Image (spheres, rainbow, N blue to C red):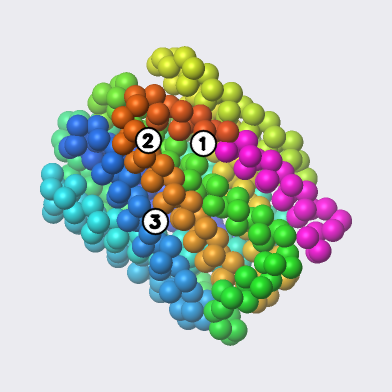
């Protein structure tokens, strides 16, 4: 990881470990819910609504402490909250679906404490010319971890139990905590946290408004598609081991595409990459919806694991580029990152209500058409991201 400083490398390492923990929660915990409820997706959707609702609430509340206080203390506290979440899973066992609101609320608090400092530190430590490389390597290493761990999780759950696997994941949380003590702190901002000031700036800077709209769309697309993919894998391939193998195989594509992107793509070429990836993702989804077979589902996941994940990476880079704009970075970087997470999580909440509405419609094909609709929105998000990329690297970038 050339040209990255000590803190940036530690942030990538912690992010990689955290991606494994989130893999366990977002894939195997969801599958656990589905197994306990007879493939009823509504408990999983409600779990995420509680998670992202609490996350949206706590971001502005944490803003003053993270901006002007000790952001590393908040970062480390997130690992302790994550340990509480895992201990609750271990303690509640098969009763976990009866306490979704408690579990989701703790997870929302954990995510707020983790991602606010993580995003602020990443924006500070990976600026200038290394931003694309930082995000490319971070995505590639997180994807590499997801190649091996799903098979291990799936096999371990199959031969032992989900609860004992949760106990192993608890050790990974401890590893995150230890690594966080090697990060050297930066000076905190002295100007008070004030989202209203950023909203006033947003009216003058279209790039901020565009980035927040993209984040809202991002929220109700990707997390919902992740859950729907797990649902279809559980339905079509039945076992946790098959779920693990399936997740690992397609993680390879995510790693290769992000590694290629981080090594060869330059920011000026984002428009071409975004356009191509958007159309490829939509094509894969359309084929699956209109010819629903195991083969078409595999093809859809080929596009989702490569092209769609690259769109996710590029939109994240655009968001960090906005946070490094001189009109934002000097005074309102923390406010922007907080507002970005609020828009992202409001989108997620909206998306999971769409999932519940699709289930309540009692039409068997409604979830498939939801996948197609979300894939169309990926194309729209790609279009908005193309315009934002041109704005951020164009001659008028200081005015837009």
- Report how far apart the C-alphas of labels 3 and 2 lie in the structure: 20 Å
Q: Is residue 258 visible?
A: no
Check disc 3 and report the residue beneath it: 52
Which of the two discs, 3 and 2, sits closer to the camera?
2
In the figure, 250 relative to 110: above or below? above
Question: Which residues lie in the magenta part?
Answer: 377-400
Q: Nearer the viewer, residue 360 or 173?
A: 360
State which quadrant residue 30 falls in.
Answer: top left
Which of the two discs, 2 and 1, sits closer to the camera?
2
Which comes before the other along the chain, label 3 or label 1? 3
Which residue is located at x 56 percent, y 83 percent?
192
Q: Left or right of 206: which side holds 337?
A: left
Which of the two discs, 3 and 1, sits closer to the camera?
1
Labels 2 & 1 near each other (Cβ < 8 A): no
Element type where label 1 sits in the image = helix
Which comes before the other along the chain, label 3 or label 2? 3
- Give the image location of residue 74, x and y in percent: 41, 71
- Give the image location of residue 175, x and y in percent: 34, 57
Magenta-drawn stretch contains 366: no
Element type where label 3 sits in the image = helix
- Report how far apart the C-alphas of labels 3 and 1 lie in the structure: 19 Å
Which residue is located at x 66 percent, y 73 percent?
200
- Give the image location of residue 27, x and y in percent: 34, 39
Q: Nearer the viewer, residue 133 or 247?
A: 247
Q: Nearer the viewer, residue 116 or 358?
A: 358
Q: Dot 2, crowdedness within 10 Å: few (<14), some or many (≥20)?
A: some
Labels 3 & 1 near each other (Cβ < 8 A): no
Check disc 1 and report the residue beneath it: 374
Q: Nearer the viewer, residue 146 or 365?
A: 365
Name the mark on residue 358.
2
């Amino acid at each position: 990881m050339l040209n990255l400083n000590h803190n940036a490398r530690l942030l990538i390492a912690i992010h990689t470990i955290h991606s494994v923990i989130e893999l366990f929660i977002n894939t195997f915990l969801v599958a656990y819910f589905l197994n306990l409820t007879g493939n009823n997706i509504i408990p999983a959707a409600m779990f995420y609504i509680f998670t992202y609702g609490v996350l949206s609430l706590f971001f502005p509340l944490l803003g003053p402490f993270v901006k002007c206080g000790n952001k590393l203390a908040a970062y480390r506290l997130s690992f302790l909250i994550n340990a509480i979440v895992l201990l609750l899973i271990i303690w509640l066992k098969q009763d976990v679906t009866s306490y979704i609101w408690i579990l989701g609320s703790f997870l929302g608090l954990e995510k707020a404490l983790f991602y606010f400092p993580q995003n602020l530190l990443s924006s500070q430590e990976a600026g200038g010319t290394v931003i694309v490389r930082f995000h490319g390597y971070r995505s590639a290493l997180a994807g590499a971890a997801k190649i091996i761990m799903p098979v291990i999780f799936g096999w371990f759950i199959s031969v032992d139990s989900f609860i004992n696997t949760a106990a192993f994941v608890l050790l990974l949380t401890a590893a995150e905590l230890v690594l966080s003590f090697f990060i050297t702190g930066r000076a905190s901002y002295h100007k008070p946290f004030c989202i209203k000031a950023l909203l006033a700036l947003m009216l003058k800077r279209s790039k901020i408004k565009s980035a927040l709209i993209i984040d809202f769309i991002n929220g109700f697309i990707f997390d919902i598609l992740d859950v729907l993919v797990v649902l279809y894998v559980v339905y079509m391939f039945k076992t946790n081991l098959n779920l693990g193998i399936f997740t690992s195989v397609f993680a390879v594509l995510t790693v290769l595409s992000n590694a290629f992107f981080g090594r060869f793509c330059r920011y000026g070429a984002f428009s071409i990459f975004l356009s191509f990836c958007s159309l490829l993702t939509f094509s894969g989804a359309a084929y699956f919806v209109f010819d629903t077979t195991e083969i078409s589902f595999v093809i859809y996941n080929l596009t989702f694991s490569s092209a769609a994940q690259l769109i996710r990476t590029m939109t994240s880079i655009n968001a960090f580029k906005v946070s490094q704009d001189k009109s934002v970075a000097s005074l309102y970087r923390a406010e922007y990152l907080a507002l970005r997470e609020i828009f992202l999580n409001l989108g997620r909440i909206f998306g999971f209500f769409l999932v519940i509405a699709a289930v309540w419609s009692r039409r068997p094909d409604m979830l498939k058409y939801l996948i197609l609709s979300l894939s169309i929105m990926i194309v729209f998000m790609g279009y908005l991201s193309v315009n934002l990329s041109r704005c951020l690297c164009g001659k008028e970038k200081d005015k837009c």
